[in-house]
Image (cartoon, coloured by chain):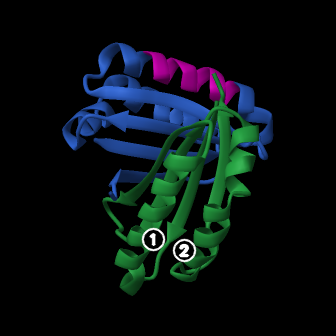
Chain colours: A blue, B green
Amino acid sequence: MIKVVATNKVKKEKIDEFIALAEKLVEATNMYDEGCIHYDIYQDINDPQVLTFIEEWESMETLNKHMAAAHFEEFVPQLGAFADGPEDVHIYQKAL
Amino acid sequence: MIKVVATNKVKKEKIDEFIALAEKLVEATNMYDEGCIHYDIYQDINDPQVLTFIEEWESMETLNKHMAAAHFEEFVPQLGAFADGPEDVHIYQKAL
């Protein structure tokens, strides 16, 4: 099992647009991408500009297919345009 | 539901000790802390020095009790001593 944490610092005036577009990505991912166990977007309770995808995938293979999917390639650059700086992405395995 | 992502950059020579101590914290949390849905320690597949707690709690109240528990107060400063710099902690709610 693979966990992904992808953290974005979103421009204050673009938060609503980021969330609306992230919803489309979440929906398309849940509809089309095999091996997706969880795929959700979270907002920091202390800093609403921090919006983070927390994801769970069956394997690296299914994650790689997701990152090559048409909806990923369409929406992720658009999401990036709403952010201050690049997305901070970590891909994890359980340490225990 | 509350999600916590607490990211640590651990000194290279302290990775094994960090994981062993984190295991004690995970065990004590699962044993004693009410409202804990998930509490796991993950390692970045691209950088083994990045060790991250990804947690799920029923509420802020249960998270606050966890952070005041004896095992938290005992183990977290010890974990901090194995890290390069402070832990990066985000507390999240679902944005959708």
Give the amino acid type for the residue marked by disc 2 in the picture: Leu
Q: Residue at x 52, y 37 (%)?
A: A53
**Are discs 2 and 1 located on one and the same chain?**
yes
User: Given the current orientation, which residue lies at the most extreme top position?
Assistant: A31
What label sits on residue B21 in the rendered view? 1
In the image, B17: left or right of B63? left
Give the amino acid type for the residue marked by disc 1 in the picture: Leu
Proximity of marks 2 and 1: CB atoms separated by less than 8 Å: yes
Q: In which quarter of the image is the N terminus of chain B?
A: top right
Question: Residue A95: x and y, percent?
Answer: 34, 59
- Secondary-structure class at tag 2: helix
User: Given the current orientation, which residue lies at the most extreme left position?
Assistant: A61
Magenta stretch secondary structure, dominant: helix
Please tell me whether residue A26 belongs to the stretch shown in magenta: yes
Looking at the image, can residue A87 be seen? no
Q: Residue at x 31, y 35 (%)?
A: A57
- Secondary-structure class at tag 1: helix
Q: Is residue A18 above or below residue A89?
A: above
User: What residue range appears in magenta?
Assistant: A17-27
Q: Which residue is drawn at 64% across and 32% down?
A: B58
Question: Label 2: which residue?
Answer: B79
Question: Residue A80: x and y, percent?
Answer: 56, 41
Q: Give the crowd class for mark 1: few <14, some 14-19, many >=20 residues within 10 Å.
A: some
In the image, B52: left or right of A82? left
Q: Residue at x 74, y 57 (%)?
A: B68
